[in-house]
Amino acid sequence: LPDAPLTVAYLRYVIDLLLDQGLHLHALMPLTLLRLVAKRILQSPALERVTALRLAHVLHALGMTQKAAAERASLGDLRPTPEAVRRNAVTLRQLRNADEAFTTAMPTADDAPSEEALGIGSAPRARRKSCARPVEAEWVDLADLLLEEGEWAVAREWLLQAAPLLGA
């Protein structure tokens, strides 16, 4: 895919529209494609888990309880692993250190670049926009789906993992 995050954004949009309109059966194909993109192209376990759980919810809504149960069982335990918790703590520490280094190294008026260097007065350059979502946003989506299932404790763990990283 030329721009996989953009494709994922469009697939999410289509899935949300279909589910909002009650077209659960029609949402199965985009959900399956989204899971394939998450697994094979983006190699994002978080997005793959969220999509699989959402697929299980849609299957359940369609009355396919056995398939929904099999899909949910294939996910296993959805709690964050201790290794993931440690990795997230390290990432948060790095983000906070980078933020402190940035605020201490603020430029002064003497360090300001000239207008020519900034390109003031010339036509602005086009920037490529990104629609990539952080992994932490997938954790929030996963927690939302887990709350729908009544898995309050597991959802709380994912939200506690995501909150500091999203706020940093």
Image: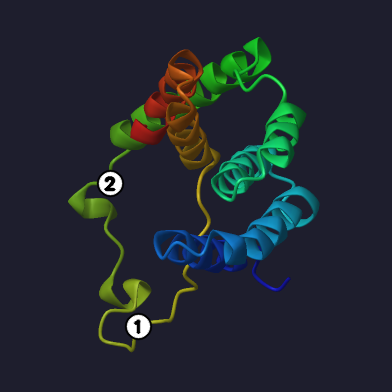
SS of the residue under disc 2: loop
- Residue shown at 43%/28% (left/top)? 147
- Separation (CA) of disc 2 from disc 1: 23 Å
Question: Which quadrant holds residue 122?
Answer: bottom left
Instruction: Indicate the amino acid at tag 1.
Output: Pro
Asked whether 109 or 154 is in front, the reply is 154
Residue 47 higher or lower than 78, as above or below: below
Residue at 69% x, 38% y is 45
Q: Quadrant of the C terminus?
A: top left
In the image, which disc is placed on residue 107?
A: 2
Colour convention: rainbow
Marks 2 and 1, the one that precedes in the sequence: 2
**Residue 130: x and y, percent?**
50, 64
Residue located at (63% from left, 20% from top) = 84
Q: Is residue 72 visible?
A: yes
Give the residue pinned by disc 1: 124
Whether residue 5 appears in this view of the structure is no
Q: Which of labels 2 and 1 is toward the front?
A: 1
Q: Provide residue 144's location: percent of width, then percent of height.
A: 43, 34
Q: Quadrant of the N terminus?
A: bottom right
Going by the numbered disc 2, the residue's amino acid type is: Pro
Q: Position of residue 119 (x, y in %)?
A: 34, 78
- Relative to 38, residue 12 above or below: below
Q: Is residue 153 above or below residue 56?
A: above
- Is residue 61 toward the left or the right of residue 4 in the image? left
SS class of the residue under badge 1? loop
Q: Residue at the spot x=48%, y=65% of the render?
A: 18
